[in-house]
Image (tube, coloured by chain):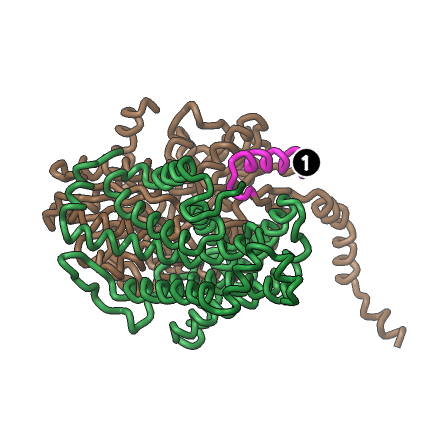
Amino acid sequence: MREKTATHLGRRTVLAASAGALAMPFVARAQANPLKIGIQSIFSGPIALLGASSKGAIQPEIDRINATGGLLGRQIQPIYRDSKGQPQEAARVARELVNTDGCEILLNAEASSGAYAVQEVVRDLGVLCIHTTAEASSLTADPKLRAPTAFRSARQGVHDAIVGGSYSAKVAVAKKLTKWATCSPDYSFGRDTTAQFGEFLKHFAPDIEITSQSWPKMGQPDFTEVVTKILQAKPQALYSAMFAGDLSAFINQGNAYALFSAMQVFVPAMGDLPVLTTIKNMPAGIHSAARYLPTFPDTPVNAAWYEANRKFNNNDYPTNWSWECSTAARFMEAAVKKAGSTNGKAAAAALEGLTIDSPFSTTGKITMRAEDHTMIGYAIGWGTTVPKEPFVTGIEPGDWGQITELETEWKKKNGYI
Amino acid sequence: MIDLDALLECVTTTSCLVTQTTSGLIVGMLLFLVAAGLTLIFGVLKIVNFAHGTFYMLGAYLAYTVFAITGSYILSVLAGGLGMAFFGIVFERFLIRRVYGANVLMQLLICYATVLICDDLVKIIWGPDFYAMGMPPEFQVPPLFIAGGVVPPFYLVLISVALVIGGGLAMVLGLTKIGKIIRAAAHNPDMVSALGINTTLLYSLVFAVGGMLAGIAGGLAAPVRSLTPGMGFSILIESFIVTVIGGMGSIGGALIAAVMLGLIRSFGTIGFPLFTEGLMYIAMIIILVLKPSGLFGKEIV
């Protein structure tokens, strides 16, 4: 028996074993020196979905990179931290991730308020940081706020406002909707988004008049008085920047008053799967942006990503934040590979102007614009809701030529250029 | 910021008056159910139950789950109420009872810890996503038009149910023996105990009733409101305003204050669109300046 075993140790086996033994120090070094990446988000409280869906999109990307040998030969070790949605905590967590935990890169899945705070820490520490979910335009558009090694892989508010304004104006002209009302959450995101939408809506359809505005508090338990106020104003169209649970409550309470059959309604955040699948009696014909849909862009790669993401997340639906986070991880991977280093300055230089293949673009490509460190070329469009899958139909894609042109004008107007 | 013309036009137009009044009533009556439990617990036990919003949240989640299983709205509301009555007993028996008469800070810590633990438990059991029960099929009907005003039938039912519960509570407290014992315990617990009445059981009962009211409110509101971990916080703040305005410990005061707050919201949003929340606090300040113990609170000598 022993003799038989000895004869099986042939030349190839010995060579393979030797090669493995020679490679051992490198493997051991890679395992001993993992690449730590800090990922901070809101993992607790009413917006915990932000953290859950961000992690649910970044982790599969890290698993994929690690399974194929890691990044620069080092296994990625993600460190997740909860900022609880507080800007001062977000700044503290960012500093701790780098200084104490030894993270070399930050993927910052904070809301806009937290992202501004993290950006100042990044300016100080000089590490590569990608804001994955902050949509407030000034974060990267304002040169005074922009940081040399900070980038944004999220939608930008002004892009949505241009496409939303263009689409809504077209509907308004066709249906002769001149009297509009707005209803948005009473904080910076709601006010900025509504103002930008109104600006571009009037740019495309100057006859439009906004006759009634409501500003409910975010997370307030009941919006009934806002629904009835809108009914009293008798507008022909309504725009709302509400989102997530507040939007769901607003839709349910509006349904009770038949609000959605009394006017045309435009809600950018409606086209997100958790909203579309949660609202039980969803009215048809609401105009919405396609935040994330497996059917927009209607490509095999997008459908495959959707299926894989649901499988990873116990069949939960991906959110708009999911594709943004997935994109951030892919940008990080491509930039570090191109730079051959995780050094903030070198990786940032590599990321500027970098174009990657992406399932989340109608052209299959997304670019990190060099001059203002924000992402362009992603799928952006508006359509109308239907109560069943695919939930949003007739999606009209935005024209990136027009978006860039009007964005430049908007930047000049705001003194950003 | 101020649109007095719109407000004047609204109060002089029947359709607007009807729509906004019913809108104020529905907001107010659901708030009353939560605040009634809060004020009852304070009245008898002198405990400020900062975890009361959690009862509302858990009631709503429980109702949502029962509705998803049975499809019965009535069963789901009952489950929310009974479930929270049980939770109220457990909360009183194992946590709050240990800090009766202790520093208010200690009570606050116990309540806050309960809020955090329950919010996390909700996240673990139901997930961080928000939920919507959706309108039960029997209420999926077009709104009624009364004197030109728009009134959803479902809201009429909610207002009626809340009124019946409030009336029933007032009757039990005012006319029955147990009600008299509860009122006596609120006034002088030592004397009630000396008379051989089991105050331990009584306190559990009070927490059960308080929890049940909040649970019912959560269940009733579930078809039109969103369910999120932490949803109890905002309703807790408004319930405190109601309790303070109405007078700590006064059920009648809570009813008046809750309806008042609902109407301030519904008419305030037309006349003072950017200051509706502020109006509620101004109302509270004015009432506290004029009557520091609240509308129906007892003056402390």
Which of A239/B18 is in front? B18
Q: Position of residue B186 (x, y in %)?
A: 55, 56
Q: Position of residue B99 (x, y in %)?
A: 67, 52
Which stretch is magenta?
A83-101
Determine whether, in the image, residue A350 is placed left or right of residue B94: left
Q: Is residue A89 in the magenta section?
A: yes
Which of B130/A53 is in front? B130
Identify the secondary structure beneath mark 1.
loop
Q: Position of residue A49 (x, y in %)?
A: 48, 53
**Mark 1 is on which residue type?**
Thr
Chain B image colour: green
Determine whether, in the image, residue A157 is placed left or right of residue B51: left
Which part of the image, by quadrant, shows the N terminus of chain A? bottom right
The residue located at (27%, 54%) in the rendering is B23
* Residue A125 figure quarter: top right
Q: Is residue A394 above or below residue A328?
A: below
Residue bearing the label numbered 1? A100
Chain of residue at mark 1: A
Chain A image colour: brown
Determine if residue A75 is in view.
no
